[in-house]
Image (cartoon, rainbow, N blue to C red):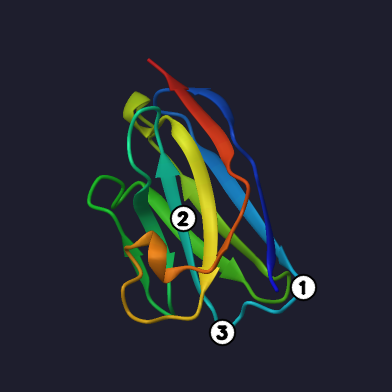
Amino acid sequence: QVQLVASGGGLVQAGDSLRLSCAASGRTVSSYQLGWFRQAPGKEREFVAASTGSAYYADSVKGRFTISRDNAKNTVYLQMSSLKPEDTAVYYCAAGTSSGNFRHPNDYRYWGQGTQVTVSS
């Protein structure tokens, strides 16, 4: 079993930066596919970024967000810059053994509890 705890969310202004963290416990996730998803009110959960050995991003965040992982700390990060009001959502980290469909929530077995990011205009 893997437990994930996400943190780092908050209320920021448009153009600001935030770094989300997701600490894993129970098992090392160095060989796992790690991802970030987000869900805004009334919308479906959507892919944001994934780290599978390479980094992949949704078009909406490419160039602004960076996913990284620290295997020594068993932690994955999402550095967000140039934030926009449309980035407002609950952000979830996830881990799983890759089947190649890293953009889909079903490809992840373990999920963090979510951290709220609110970007004001």
**Nearest-to-viewer mark from 1 and 3:** 1
Label 3 element class: loop
Reply above or below: 55 against 58.
Answer: below
Label 1 element class: loop
The label on residue 49 is none
Identify the residue at horizontal 32%, vertical 63% (top origin): 103
Which sits in the foreground, 31 or 98? 98
Q: Is residue 114 left or right of residue 89?
A: right
Question: Which residue carries the number 2 mark?
Answer: 36
Q: Locate the C terminus by quadrant.
A: top left
Identity, as a three-letter code, of the amino acid under mark 3: Ser
Residue 119 image point, x, y percent: 45, 24
Which of pointers 1 and 3 lies earlier in the amino acid sequence?
1
Reply above or below: 15 against 35.
Answer: above
Identify the residue at horizontal 61%, vertical 53% (top origin): 112
Identify the residue at horizontal 30%, vertical 51% (top origin): 63
Which of pointers 1 and 2 lies earlier in the amino acid sequence?
1
Residue 8 image point, x, y percent: 64, 41
Distance between the alpha carbons at the discs numbered 1 and 3: 14 Å
Question: Which residue carries the number 1 mark?
Answer: 26
Decide: few, some or many residues near mark 2? Use Cα within 10 Å; few <14, some 14-19, many ≥20: many
Identity, as a three-letter code, of the amino acid under mark 1: Gly
Decide: few, some or many residues near mark 1? Use Cα within 10 Å; few <14, some 14-19, many ≥20: few
Question: Which residue carries the number 3 mark?
Answer: 31
Q: Locate the N terminus by quadrant.
A: bottom right
Distance between the alpha carbons at the discs numbered 1 and 2: 19 Å
Distance between the alpha carbons at the discs numbered 2 and 3: 16 Å
**On the image, which quarter does residue 85 sit in?**
top left
Label 2 element class: strand
Q: For the view shown, which residue lies furthest in the left direction?
A: 59
Q: Is residue 63 left or right of residue 13?
A: left
